[in-house]
Image (cartoon, rainbow, N blue to C red):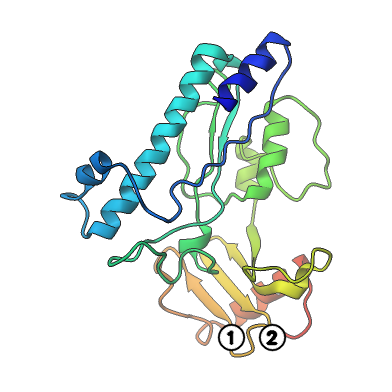
Amino acid sequence: EPIEEFIQQARRAEQPYFLWYAPFLPHTPHNPPTALQNKYRPLAPSDAIAKYWAMCEWFDQTVGQLREIIRTQGDPQNTLIVFVCDNGWINLMDRSAYAPKSKRSQYDGGLRTPIMIHWPGKVAARRNDVDLASSIDLLPTVLALLGAESDPRLPGIDISNPRAVAGREAIMGEIFEHDIQSMDQAEASLRYRWVIEKQLKLIAPHSSRVPDGVFELYDLAQDPWEENNLAAQLPDQVQRLSARLQRWWPQQGK
């Protein structure tokens, strides 16, 4: 109801609106409706997985309800919808909890999440699961779609522009502690930096907060689950990608 009232109020005032819809679904506790859980029980390898899949569909249903509100009471042809999520999730087989190498990890199971953009008549429907994209691309992309001027100092690119996407060489990111230590010094909670360049991914641990950590290098095309560390076999690539990370965010030590 608050969402519906908010959209109605904006329409009556003939004003544009920004709506941030961030439900708790499909986070734990996994307590989906019985009908949805029963739907997935014969399809899933375990009851825990069935619950998780049911939670995902439950979330999908709420998104459908939101889109229906926009269709009937908003202005769907003039509404840009962007979907992002904050982390990946691989559910354990035996209970409702995330598996290693997923949420809060420096591996693709925790980092690789979808970005979806929907705008009827303005954004053509297509799928791209090959080229690199990042959440830092959201602002320049939205500005470009709206025809607004972007600040060249922004770190991201317009992912609706094929030339910009093709010209990107790499993306970088970081993993912090769950509870940050300082609002003013991000480094105080930094655990890992990582870089993906084409199919290669380097993970660099922070020498102070992960003292036993080692550099990890993976070929994501051949090893998507990041099980075969190539750092010892390809030291030149480790050195080259480490230098790229240092140019992006210099750190002492590793």
Q: Where is residue 20 in the image (x, y as percent from the top left)?
A: 63, 35
Badges 2 and 1: C-beta atoms under 8 Å apart? Answer: yes
Quarter occupied by residue 175: bottom right
Q: Where is residue 93 in the image (x, y as percent from the top left)?
A: 28, 65
Quadrant into which the C terminus falls = bottom right
User: Vertical placement of 74 versus 190: above or below?
Assistant: above
Give the residue displayed 62% in from the left and 68% down from the top: 178
Mark 2: amino acid: Ser
Question: What residue does disc 1 label?
Answer: 213
| Residue at the extreme bottom | 212
Quarter occupied by residue 57: top left
User: Vertical placement of 11 versus 179: above or below?
Assistant: above
201 and 24: which one is in front?
Answer: 24
32 and 180: which one is in front?
Answer: 32
Judged from the image, the secondary structure of the residue bearing numbered disc 1 is loop
150 and 170: which one is in front?
Answer: 150
Q: Position of residue 40 (x, y in %)?
A: 22, 47
Judged from the image, the secondary structure of the residue bearing numbered disc 2 is loop
Using a 10 Å C-alpha cutoff, classify the residue at mark 1 as few (fewer than 14 neighbours), some (14 to 19) or many (20 or more).
Answer: some
Quadrant into which the N terminus falls = top right
Mark 1: amino acid: Gly
125 relative position to 164: left or right: left
User: Vertical placement of 57 versus 206: above or below?
Assistant: above
Question: What residue does disc 2 label?
Answer: 207
Give the residue displayed 79% in from the left and 82% down from the top: 252
Q: Earlier in the sequence, mark 2 or mark 1?
A: 2
